[in-house]
Amino acid sequence: MEYRRMGKTGLQLSVLSFGSWVTFHKQIEDTTADELMGIAYDNGINFFDNAEVYALGESEKMMGRVLKKKGWDRTSYVISSKAFFGWRGKENKPNQTGLSRKHLVEACNEALQRLQTDYLDLYFCHRPDKNVPIEEVVWTMNHLIQQGKVLYWGTSEWSGVEIMEAHRVAQQYGLIGPAMEQPQYNLFEREKLEKEYLPIFKNVGLGTTIWSPLASGLLTGKYNTGIPENSRLGLEGFDWLKDRWMAEEKINKVKSLSGLANRLGVTTASLSIAWCIKNPNVTTAILGATRKEQLLDNLKALDALPKLTSEVMTEIDDIMQTKPVQPEY
């Protein structure tokens, strides 16, 4: 396993990590989660990602039960939560969502209870909140760090402008700014990490814990001939994912990518993940496997990484019909 420092912090994250977005509780139960987290940990993964909204709190409860059962040294792994959407679904009342001081503090306390831990290593603002002054957000996160409930705070799907505004406020008041961002990044989603965030990487430093490196499974090639039963895109309530990814143009690109993977002697999934972590501005790519075989294959991205020569990277860009994004300064 390779470990990378999270931006300009001293924290080291495994370049591959394990998350629980729609897998925990919706696709797998405790026994499988226990097995997969064990495989991940035994293979050097030290970061486990979660959020209040995942399975409406049940994902954190499941991860908490597994971590308690495993009894791993708490200093050997990193655990996260994210706040914004709330966990009560349609029953959310005012102040049970968003980035107000009230919700951030209460969501943090609830996450600690569900995960059965004394502190969160990483705590994310899951989306920007235009209804809350950025000063309130930064002060609240700084307060949680001072209390010892959070070690690092960050953002998820914020714009570069919003992240820099948080840093401006932090500098103005002598507070701790966001250390990491969790954006979507894969062969179909490249703009933020390859262009928009480049000035932040250069000027203040930013760790990235990218999600959906396989574009919700599309980049595994398993959807090349349709939607398999019990797959993520077949889940009830996730039609928006199907609408987003199941376009003929995207499927044809994945088929071509699968051809390249075969020539290289790797799977489409491991090639796609390796492509993500080839980017030095990616601290870690979050995996979301539901089966042992999937996870072991995803871990082979580390073996596929050396095969990504400049020629292969150019061929991938040609397949995706995307030129490498050039920064604008």
Image (spheres, rainbow, N blue to C red):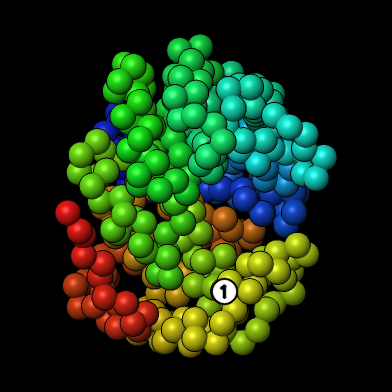
Secondary structure at numbered mark 1:
helix
Task: Give the image location of residue 275, x and y in percent.
Answer: 34, 65
Q: Residue at x 49, y 72 (%)?
A: 219
Q: Quadrant of the C terminus?
A: bottom left
Q: Residue furthest top?
A: 147
Q: In the picture shown, does residue 198 fall above or below 204?
A: below
What type is the residue that disc 1 sits on?
Trp
Side (left or right) of 89 relative to 302: right
Residue 10 falls in image quadrant: top left
Side (left or right) of 262 relative to 65: left
Task: Give the image location of residue 163, x and y in percent.
Answer: 37, 39
Residue 241 falls in image quadrant: bottom right
Side (left or right) of 261 relative to 248: left
Q: Residue furthest right?
A: 91
Task: Give the image location of residue 286, x and y in percent.
Answer: 48, 51
Task: Give the image location of residue 86, x and y in percent.
Answer: 69, 37
In the rendered image, which residue does mark 1 sit on? 245
Q: How many marks?
A: 1
Give the crowd class for mark 1: few <14, some 14-19, many >=20 residues within 10 Å. some
Q: Residue at x 63, y 74 (%)?
A: 243
In the foreground, 228 or 297: 228
Q: In the picture shown, does residue 129 fall above or below 43?
A: above
Q: Residue at x 35, y 62 (%)?
A: 191
Q: Residue at x 49, y 54 (%)?
A: 211
Side (left or right) of 324 relative to 304: left
In the foreground, 188 or 101: 101
Q: Is residue 259 visible?
A: yes
Q: Is residue 63 visible?
A: no
